[in-house]
Image: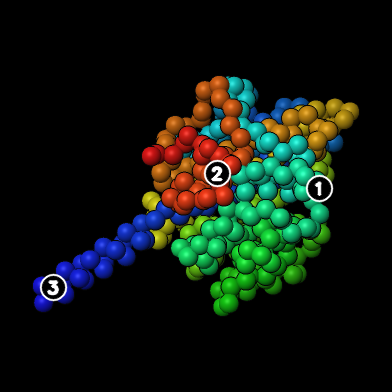
């Protein structure tokens, strides 16, 4: 009898240890500038009638004379809660820099760099729907015994199945206007499928982030992935339209969605205190608000497009808050950081990284 009890205890403790593996929620927010993240609404843009359609209402919500209050108004979750649980890199006003290494500075090139740990200007010159010749960390994880079938990806942009090369990687990629990919969709997912079909489409290749977000949330509830990648997209499209109002509102809403993910994670025994959030962007944007209006766009010819930022918070992240050191970090270090969080020995990463110095050893 004693022997059985011992074996039982052993089995329970083994399964508990297995459950205590770190999970990661890896997020990108397309083309969200470090300027808004660290300084809040831009005084030049928020006061320009051609970029906002109800200035007073918008200023009521997002304008505060003091910079710290302004960024808190725009990103209340990031600045009132997440900052105390992790590290924020890339406030260039303090000399802390986070940059992309690729020179293309369009979305595909940025996502490739973040997800693989390497820029590839030879093969990725634009946003064409070409299967990525490079393997992302998600694909490499999905090839391993431990992570196979335990990774989920969600994106608002319909190029993600190519960036993640779903044909080769066999990853589950719910992007563009796809429905839930789960075999037995939940009632919420069935409703999301229906509303997504019936909703007017503002852009042909990018859906509104609410669909991406809620499909991801349902997957967290029912699939319990070990790694979840979520690519929010609206911010970039509204900026390209020159719609600063919608860009700000979307940035604000994304902060709220990330809060919802965090609150879900902390309420769920599978994820609670065992999950790390890693958040970054695929590129910066220009700064000028006059004549050229470079703030709307990004790319090789637009100055400051390489300027990015990085946030990590949750389990295993040092509680350093906003980094004030005069250091330079790169998007090529993100994949190595996620691999380290998972304790995953990523052989192909010999050339990438090193991981960012934000994790508790
Ligand atoms: Zn863009």
Q: State yes or no: Cβ of the residue under disc 2 lies below 8 Å from any atom of ligand 1.
A: no
Identify the element where label 3 is drawn: helix
| Residue at left offset 81%, top offset 59% | 204
Q: Quadrant of residue 249?
A: top right
Q: Residue furthest right?
A: 291
Which numbered disc, 1 or 2, marks the residue that appears first in the sequence?
1
- Specify the quadrant that holds the N terminus: bottom left
> Residue 216, percent across and down?
58, 61
Residue underneath mark 2: 350
Residue underneath mark 3: 3
Which numbered disc, 3 or 1, marks the residue that appears first in the sequence?
3
| Residue at left offset 73%, top offset 65% | 177
Give the left or right position of residue 254, taking residue 343 as reference: right
Mark pair 3, 2: CA separation: 46 Å
> Residue 295, percent across and down?
78, 34
Which coloring applies here? Answer: rainbow
Q: Residues within 10 Å of mark 3 (few under 14, many from 20)?
A: few
Residue nearer the viewer, 258 or 200: 258
Give the left or right position of residue 224, taking residue 99 as reference: left
Say if residue 116 shows up in the picture: yes
Which numbered disc, 3 or 2, marks the residue that appears first in the sequence?
3
Residue nearer the viewer, 13 or 65: 13
- Specify the quadrant that holds the C terminus: top left
> Residue 71, percent across and down?
60, 33
Identify the element where label 1 is drawn: loop
| Residue at left offset 77%, top offset 44% | 122
Which labelled disc corresponds to residue 271?
none
Q: Quadrant of residue 110?
A: top right
Q: State yes or no: Cβ of the residue under disc 1 lies below 8 Å from any atom of ligand 1.
A: no
Residue underneath mark 1: 126
């Amino acid at each position: 009898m004693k022997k059985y009890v011992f074996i039982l205890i052993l089995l329970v403790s083994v399964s508990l240890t297995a459950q205590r593996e770190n999970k990661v929620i890896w997020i990108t927010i397309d083309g969200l500038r470090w300027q808004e993240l660290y300084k809040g609404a831009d005084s030049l843009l928020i006061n320009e009638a051609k970029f906002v359609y109800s200035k007073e209402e918008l200023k009521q919500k997002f304008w505060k004379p003091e910079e710290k209050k302004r960024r808190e108004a725009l990103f209340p979750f990031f600045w009132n809660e997440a900052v105390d649980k992790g590290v924020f890199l890339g406030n260039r006003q303090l000399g802390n820099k986070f940059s992309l290494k690729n020179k293309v500075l369009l979305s595909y090139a940025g996502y490739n760099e973040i997800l693989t740990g390497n820029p590839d200007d030879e093969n990725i010159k634009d946003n064409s729907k070409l299967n990525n010749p490079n393997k992302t960390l998600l694909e490499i994880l999905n090839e391993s015994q431990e992570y196979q079938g335990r990774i989920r990806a969600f994106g608002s942009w319909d190029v993600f199945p190519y960036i993640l090369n779903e044909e080769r990687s066999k990853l589950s990629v719910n992007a563009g206007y796809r429905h839930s990919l789960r075999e037995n969709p939940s009632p919420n997912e069935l409703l999301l499928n229906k509303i997504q079909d019936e909703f007017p489409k503002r852009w042909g290749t990018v859906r509104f982030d609410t669909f991406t977000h809620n499909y991801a949330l349902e997957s967290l509830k029912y699939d319990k992935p070990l790694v979840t990648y979520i690519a929010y997209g609206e911010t970039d499209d509204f900026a390209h339209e020159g719609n600063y109002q919608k860009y700000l509102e979307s940035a604000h809403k994304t902060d709220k969605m990330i809060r919802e993910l965090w609150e879900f994670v902390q309420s769920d025994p599978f994820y609670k205190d065992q999950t790390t959030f890693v958040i970054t962007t695929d590129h910066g944007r220009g700064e000028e608000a006059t004549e050229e209006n470079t703030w709307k766009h990004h790319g090789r010819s637009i100055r400051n497009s390489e300027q990015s930022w990085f946030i990590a918070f949750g389990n295993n992240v040092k509680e350093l808050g906003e980094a004030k050191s005069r250091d330079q970090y790169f998007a090529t270090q993100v994949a190595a950081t996620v691999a380290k969080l998972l304790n995953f020995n990523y052989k192909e990463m010999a050339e990438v990284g090193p991981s960012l110095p934000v994790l508790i050893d």
